[in-house]
Image: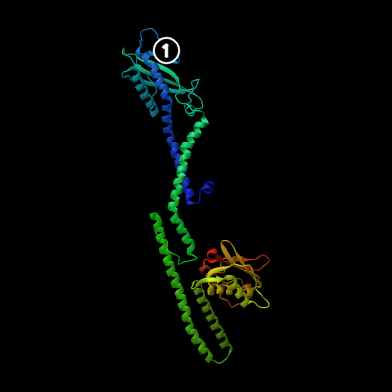
Amino acid sequence: MRLLRRLWPRTLFGQLLLIMISGTLVIQLMSSSIWFDVRFAQVLEAPVRLIAARSAPLIAQADCHGTARQVPKHYQLRCAEAPPEGEHDQRRGWRRIELLLHQALAYELGGDVRPRLLKVRLTDELGQPIVWRSLFGLRTAQAHIEFAVPLADGHWLVIDGQELQGWSGESAWVLISDYLLRVYALRIAAVLVVCLVAVRLCLRPLRRLADAARGLGGNLEQAPLPLDGPEEVRHAAQAFNAMQQRLIRMVNDKAYFLAAVSHDLRTPLTRMRLRLERLEDSEHKERLRQNIAQMDGMIGQVLDYLRAGEQQNLQTVDLDRLVARQCADLANAEEPLSIHGQVGQAQVDALLLQRCLQNLLVNALRYAREVAVVLESTPTDGYIHIDDRGPGIDPGLLATVTEPFVRGEDSRNQASGGYGLGLSIAQRIVASHGGELQLRNRQGGGLRVSVRLPRGNIA
């Protein structure tokens, strides 16, 4: 079972092709018995006609009470008073031979003759049956046919004759290869062409559905799928479009709710801040002021996160200059923020991308040292790498650290006052541009954060 599972194709085209070819081969093997019956009759057609032609004078001059007549070589004659018993073969090949013998004798004798076929054999020189080998031309066989015809005096004349088979090939391999080529290879090629056409026609909508499903995570507002193709595919596309609309409504409702709550929370915070100012200075007053500032900062980051996924003003931006400006604003004597390489221009929202780079650079400067920016351009993507030498991130958190309110290990967050939204905001901004935020620990310590923008956004 494991071997069959490994051999089973994973693509729909491979599965469809395997099923159709296997079914074709099974059907062809089952129908080979019909071909054998037809070929068996064809092999014996010439011997039957020749035996009928040589037997006609013997039947016309037969006299069971007279002297023996000279018969051709490999022929034997005898008379019987009762109808002789022969084999009863119900195969269509047997019936074809009997009908052919009747027609050939009637033609040769000029009258209706009712022969009774008693025996049909294809044998070698020793009399051993070699039906299959003879049909494939391994050797020339002898057709051994025995039949009986009624005479006018009530006797039966039994004729036993042998003639060479009427059909043979050049060689076994030529016949077999020709048969396999014309019957099996051509059919398999036809099935392959049919599968290619069927798969291309039927799978094109499914491929669009798969591409749309993959792109839904990065762009929820993408165009709906066209409703074409087979009925099942149209139903799937219709269900996908409905699901997309439900997701859009759910995300919008969630964003609206969070934005409304965050905005409304600032009103009581403002009142608390005003009332706090009327209190006398004390340790409790300072703690309340810090708590209010912390809540206000958290609300501000939540609003920033919700706005981060919205592209508002796409324009052609020189990424090299934008990165250089950000590094110049954040660099100091202790951390000069060196820049290496070039990436070129891109169609981006400059303010959002600037906010993304600011979050990443501030995190690097806050938790690490030796921060450097590497710009890289490939045929398919453009990269902005931010390297540092610091504690890095626990490998178990690399896959989830960009989710909202997930913070890295304590070594990167001591006394930071963060809320776990900095990387989430950066990741959301990059995803809104069709890119990806990648994080991995560096050898020798530290972290590399990479902003990947697809080549379509790079000029």
Q: Secondary structure at mark 1?
A: loop
Q: Looking at the rendering, in which quadrant would you find the C terminus?
A: bottom right
User: Residue drawn 47% across and 61% down?
Assistant: 213
Q: Nearer the viewer, residue 199 or 5?
A: 199
Colouring scheme applied when the structure was drawn: rainbow
Q: Is residue 415 visible?
A: no
Q: As drawn, is 222 to the left or to the right of 339?
A: left
Q: Nearer the viewer, residue 258 or 332?
A: 332
User: Residue drawn 47% across and 36% down?
Assistant: 182
Image spot of residue 114 (x, y percent):
33, 20
Q: Is residue 264 above or below residue 248?
A: below
Image spot of residue 84 (x, y percent):
37, 18
Q: As drawn, is 52 to the left or to the right of 369?
A: left
Image spot of residue 117 (x, y percent):
38, 21
User: Residue drawn 57% across and 85% down?
Assistant: 287
Q: Is residue 234 above or below residue 109?
A: below
Question: Farthest top residue?
Answer: 67
Total numbered labels = 1
Q: Is residue 411 visible?
A: yes
Q: As drawn, is 203 to the left or to the right of 344?
A: left
User: Residue drawn 53% across and 77% down?
Assistant: 301
Image spot of residue 15 (x, y percent):
48, 48
Amino acid residing under circle 1 = Val
Q: Is residue 162 above or below residue 355?
A: above
Q: As drawn, is 36 to the left or to the right of 173?
A: left
Other-residue count near label 1 (Cα within 10 Å), few / some / many at <14 / 14–19 / ≥20: few
Which residue has dot 1 on it? 71
